[in-house]
Amino acid sequence: MRPSILFPLFADIKTLPGLGPKIAALVERAAGPHLVDLLWHMPTGLVDRRFSPAIADAPEGAVVTLRVRVAEHFPSRRRGMPYKVRCEDASGEIDLVYFHAKGDYLEKLLPVGADRVVSGKIERYRDGVQMPHPDHVAPPEQFEAIATVEPTYGLTAGLSPKVLVKAIKAAVAKAPELPEWADKNLVAQRGWPSWRTALTQAHAPKENSDTQPGTVVRSRLAYDELFANQLALALVRARDRRRPGRSVKGDGRLRDKVLAALPFKLTGSQTVALSEILGDMGAPGRMQRLLQGDVGSGKTVVAFLAMLTAIEAGYQAALMAPTEILARQHYETILPLAEAAGIEVAVLTGRDKGKVKQATIERLAAGQISVVVGTHALFEDDVAFDNLGLAVIDEQHRFGVHQRVAFAAKGASEEGGVDTLIMTATPIPRTLVMCAYGDMDVSKLTEKPPGRKPIKTVALPLERMDEVVERVRALIDKGARVYWVCPLVDESEIIDLAAATERYADLTARFGEARVHLIHGKLKPTQKDAAMDAFVNGPPGVLVATTVIEVGVNVPSATVMVIEHAERFGLAQLHQLRGRVGRGAAESSCVLLYGQPLGQTAKARLEILRETEDGFRIAEKDLELRGAGEVLGTKQSGLPQFRLADLAEHADLLEIARDDARVLLEADPTLETPRGKAVRTLLYLFERDAAFKLARTG
């Protein structure tokens, strides 16, 4: 139950005075539905309203606060013309300019002959001075309150800064003094104020530098958020380790058959990762392990060898992928290995219908299928296992956490829970691993299989498109298979980007229909399959695609990747797309076509891609350029969305928070000491209370 001291902060923003339903909806869109969300909505800058010159001395473009007398109103003479209110002081005149304002409202706000304080930006129009839509209009006695430094916040369409500032001030005023949850030595060492003082100061910046994430007060608040995150993960991890698992140990007979059938030897990192996974599976607790591997590092083989261990021990195994293309790619990779081992593997996706689907479900429930590969279809209610021992989830960040739990629960029994192995081909920065997967052990594949050659990467402006097309023509004449990736499916009048359908038509006209194929997310599964089959098995040619081929597509004979409007893609996306080539023994290349002018961030993306193929280095750069919120798509994945912490800025605080959480829970696992009770308040404040409840119920 949430502590009563926090009740005011979780009130609806509609309870704030002056917020009607329409305005409250705008504030909610900008910050969130509760008062606590307003606390976490940090200033992005400030407006200094302390400059108060005479009208004649007010420079163009400056934000000023003026003492004026209202002289005359000039209503708009026709539609579309502004309403002007002329004001004056001893030095001259200024027009306050309003568009779409009602005259009776302005006459009450600015009655002729009244003294007023107005604040806003100065403009010069013709020979006069004007202030369009003043930010503040108030009686003279409010001069001191207006002529100050005012924080600015992220807004949404239709929401005025003044309304949001007022709402946030009201929310901050309701913030209570809370017991200290941070280690006292850390607080003293860092010179941190209390939580409430830090919050108050963060919303009252004096200089622009005060709004940066590295300040003392922002660092204090960031630590609190990271500490709550790490505590929650540590609590969940502790609970999972208390829950019974099953010791799953194989005799190696199936693994030996597959290893003998592989055309290559496992890399050193594959061998180490497999050993770590088998060690977890053989232990009495439930395995919760993340397998990270760069593009083409051989995660699927490692996962399949782990599945064989489960089968050797008398269990079934399942692999769930986020897309049908990826699921079927895994199935095709696994199928010849399963045949070498003499076991049956099936595929189950949303495409499967009727008798075929029902037969697979029945044989799975009867234990006749050893391994199943599928999509979201695997956690449908009618899908049951005879004895699921290992659940492998690929590209977990594309699933919600509840989906992962539902999938693993299908094999739970009185004997114990299911071992879970999560794979990702999207290298995740270490800080994000700590924040999102801190409840899991981590294995990492850092090598590519022997024989893989570096991918030559070049960046060219779109003006050289014809040159690239002719080069592609020459390459496919020599037998090459080429990917050509576009950002959109259809032509857009709003966004001037290449469309896959438009590029497909253009290349078809140049190269001929038999040598150009099209694949994107709007196609039916059978159409996607036909396009992929024609690209792989037909004459050398071009596959025009959207990012539907970002992960899982494995065509070793494809050697060229062209990415059109590369500046519009994320760094991780570009790395994944490039990884579709270079999967065979032949030399491969990637062409990044970019539109000009190229922004600083886009330029940095393209430069790092040209410098390295190391996905983990690229991931760290992606975090630096974009921030944690966008790297993996937090809204769809259950990854933490930090409102106060900037992982690129506060990486050191994350390390400290992790260590503090571990030390605290070792000494006080049930959070019953005075500090432990303060920490409970912290968990509720940052809405991580579910972890505490889970840990207590076991």
Image (tube, rainbow, N blue to C red):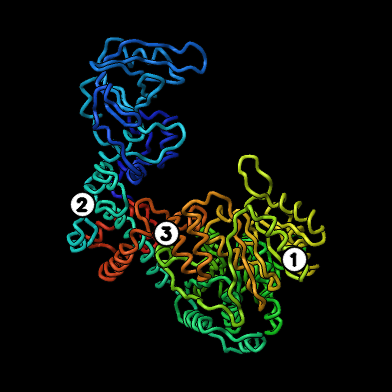
Tag 3, which secondary structure? Answer: helix
Please report the residue visible at 20 percent of the width from the left and 52 percent of the height from the top: 193
Residue located beneath label 3 in the image: 624
Q: Nearer the viewer, residue 501 or 679?
A: 501
Q: Where is 148 relative to 429, above or below?
A: above
Numbered mark located on residue 474 in the image: 1
Marks 2, 1: nearer the viewer? 1
Q: Which amino acid does label 3 sit on?
A: Glu
Tag 2, which secondary structure? Answer: loop
Horizontal and vertical percent for residue 318? 61, 71
Image quarter of residue 207: top left
Label 3 neighbour load within 10 Å: few <14, some 14-19, many 20+: some
CA distance separating discs 2 and 1: 68 Å
* Drawn side of residue 606 relative to residue 481, left or right: left
Tell me if residue 365 can be seen.
Answer: no
Residue located beneath label 2 in the image: 194
Please report the residue visible at 20 percent of the width from the left and 28 percent of the height from the top: 144
* Drawn side of residue 370 relative to residue 654, left or right: right
Horizontal and vertical percent for residue 109? 33, 16
Horizontal and vertical percent for residue 186? 21, 62
